[in-house]
Image (cartoon, grey):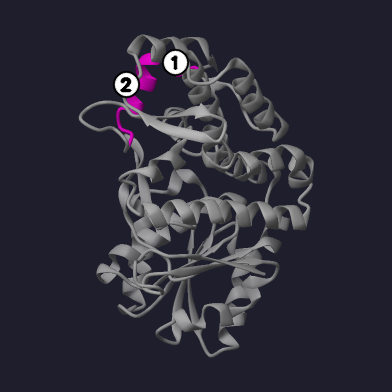
Amino acid sequence: MKTITVSLARVPGERSYPIHIGEGVLSRPGLMLEYLPQKRVVIVSNTTVAPLYLEKLGSALESHGVAPVPIILPDGEEYKNWQTLNLIFDALLTHRCERSTPIIALGGGVVGDLAGFAAATYLRGVPFIQVPTTLLAQVDSSVGGKTGINHPLGKNMIGAFYQPRVVLADTEALDTLPERQLRAGIAEIIKYGLIRDPIFLEWIESNMPALLARDAGILMQAIQRSCMNKAEVVEADERESGVRALLNLGHTFGHAIENGMGYGVWLHGEAVAAGTVLAAELSRRMGMITQADVERIVNLYRQAGLPVAAPNLGTAKYLRLMGLDKKVEGGKLRFVLLECIGGAVVRSDVPADILAETLMECTAYA
C-alpha cells in the first residue's frame, strides 16, 4: 500500500487527509476507523457496484462494531441530478442520521459527486469518506473535494467544494471494471502528463499495453503518480481560482460533448479524450504547439482505445454549451491550452474565427 497526503492548511495536519492506494484496502476498515465519529455509517453506492463490494465493506466495518446503512442509487451519469440526490436525503432523514454520521461513497465518480454533495449539505456538513471503485475516480474525482450534480443546461454547475476525511483506492476493484470504463480512466491519467508531467507522459506511452492489460504493478504506479499530481495542484489552489483550472484540459469541449449528446451516452473520459484533441488542435492553430505534438496526443489516445474525433454538434451548439462552462469569466470563454507537451495555460484571448474553424474542421459526425 502507498499513502499520499493532501495538505490543505498551513498548519501541518490541519485539514490534511490521506489517500491510501493498494490491493485489498477495501477490506481494511482500520484505515478509516479514526475518521468515524460514531458507530453508524451511511454507505452510498449504486446498482452496479453494490452487488460487488457493499457486503465486503459492510462486513469489514461490522467486524469493528460499526453498523452500515446502505443507500443504493441507479447507475449512470444520467442520474447525477436533483432527483437522485433527494433519494440520499430521503434515506438520511428516514434513518435520522446525525451531524456526526459519516457518509461513505462506494463507487465511481457519479456516486462520489452525489454522496459528497449530500455530505456537504445535509445538516450543513457531515463527515465524508471516498472509496472509489473506478480508475477515473481513483486517479481524479475522489481527490480534491469537488462534489455536485448536473443540470440539463450544464454539467457540474451545481455543487460544493467539500473535502473527504480519507480516500481508500483499492486496486483490486479494477478487476471487475468494464473495459470501456478502464479506458475512460486512462484518459484522465494522460491528462496529468500533458498539463504538467512530461516524464510521466513518456512512461504512459511506454506502458500503455500494460495499463490496458491491467498489470497490477503498472496500474498502482499510474494511480500513485496521478494522485501525487492531483494533490500538488489541489494543495496550491483548493477552490480553482488559479492553477487548478489547468486540470480541466479538454473538459470545456468534453462537457459540451457530454451534455450535447445526452448525459451517459459518452463516458466522461471519452469526452475528455476527444475534447483534449480539440484543445490540442486549437493550441496548434494559435501557434502554441506543433503538428507533431498534436499527432503524438492523437496517437496516445488511439493506443488507449479512446475517441479522438468529437461529434459534430454544430458550432453554434458547441458555443452555447461551452458558454455555461465554470471557467467563463466576464462573459468570455476561457480555454485550457497547451504551450508544450507538459505545459498548460488558461487563455481567454482565443480568436472567434480560429475557434469556429477548429470546431468546423475537427469534429467528425453527428
Residue at mark 1: 286
Front position in the image: 359 or 44: 359
Please provide the residue range marked out in magenta.
312-325
Left or right, 214 with respect to 128, comes to: right
Label 1 crowd (10 A; few <14 / some 14-19 / many >=20): some
Residue 349's tag is 2
Write down the quadrant of residue 39 in the picture.
bottom left
Residue at image position (69%, 35%) is 304
- Could you say where residue 4 lies in the image, as x and y percent from the top left? 55, 65
The stretch drawn in magenta includes residue 318: yes
Q: Is residue 259 visible?
A: no
Residue contact at pointers 2 and 1, CB within 8 angstroms: no
Q: Quadrant of residue 192?
A: top right
Q: Nearer the viewer, residue 200 or 212?
A: 200
> For the point 57% across and 17% down, which residue is it?
290
Q: Amino acid at mark 2?
A: Asp
Whether residue 42 is situated above or below residue 198 in the rendered picture: below
Mark 2 or 1 closer to N-term? 1
Kindly state the secondary structure of the residue where label 1 is placed. loop
Tell me which corner region of the image, top left, top right, bottom left or bottom right, holds residue 47: bottom right
